[in-house]
Image (cartoon, rainbow, N blue to C red):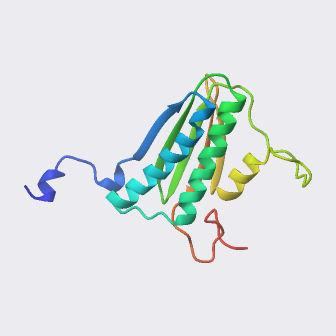
Amino acid sequence: MDAAAQNQGQEPLADRPIAVSATFGSSAEIAEARDMARDFLTSVQAELGVPASARAMGMVQLVVSELVTNARKHAPGPCRLDLEISEGAVQVTVWDSGTALPSVQATDPDRVGQHGLEIVMAVSRTFHVHREPVGKRITASVVLADAPGGDAAGRPAR
């Protein structure tokens, strides 16, 4: 059977979501969340030819680590991690049951720790927090391919 016949009646690959999800219930699973992100990007790169720079691989793992760490630290119960490739970026979404919205603290070079959201916002194209009927959902978008003359988040140089 030829490729056209195999795909008959299916959406073109570019129109289908490329996504993976998992639930994490303990702080010990933060490394597993990072591994899931790395494995997902490696897989879509190898199997589907989706470009992902080494910088993007590292940034996605960093964003996953920071958001899952915050969810496990500040919210009761498990959290859910969703990764989806859309429009040349990975949407990293973490849901947790906590009702308190995250906030970025004022810059303080003497502060030790609590810089996670600052880092996530610095390396992401977009960052959104949404209240849910139960808890909240945080989504950060990380560009997959390095743009010439752009910064790490894929924004044009100023």
Looking at this view, is 102 or 31 the one in front?
31
Looking at this view, is 20 or 100 the one in front?
20
Q: Residue at x 44, y 50 (%)?
A: 39
Quarter of the figure that contains the N terminus: bottom left
Q: Residue at x 31, y 54 (%)?
A: 13
Q: Residue furthest front?
A: 28
Quarter of the figure that contains the C terminus: bottom right
Q: Is residue 25 above or below residue 4?
A: above
Q: Is residue 23 above or below residue 31?
A: above
Residue 92 in percent (x, y) is at: 56, 46
Looking at this view, is 127 or 114 the one in front?
114
Q: Quadrant of residue 109?
A: bottom right
Q: Residue at x 10, y 58 (%)?
A: 2
Residue 131 in percent (x, y) is at: 66, 30
Residue 31 in percent (x, y) is at: 57, 42
Q: Quadrant of residue 58?
A: bottom right
Residue 25 in percent (x, y) is at: 57, 27
Q: Residue furthest left?
A: 1
Q: Is residue 42 above or below residue 54?
A: above
- Residue 143 visible in the displayed image: no
How many discs mark residues in the rendered view?
0
Left or right position of 120 against 144: right
- Residue 97 visible in the displayed image: yes
Left or right position of 31 against 48: right
Q: Residue at x 47, y 53 (%)?
A: 86
Left or right position of 48 against 149: left
Q: Is residue 75 above or below residue 81?
A: above
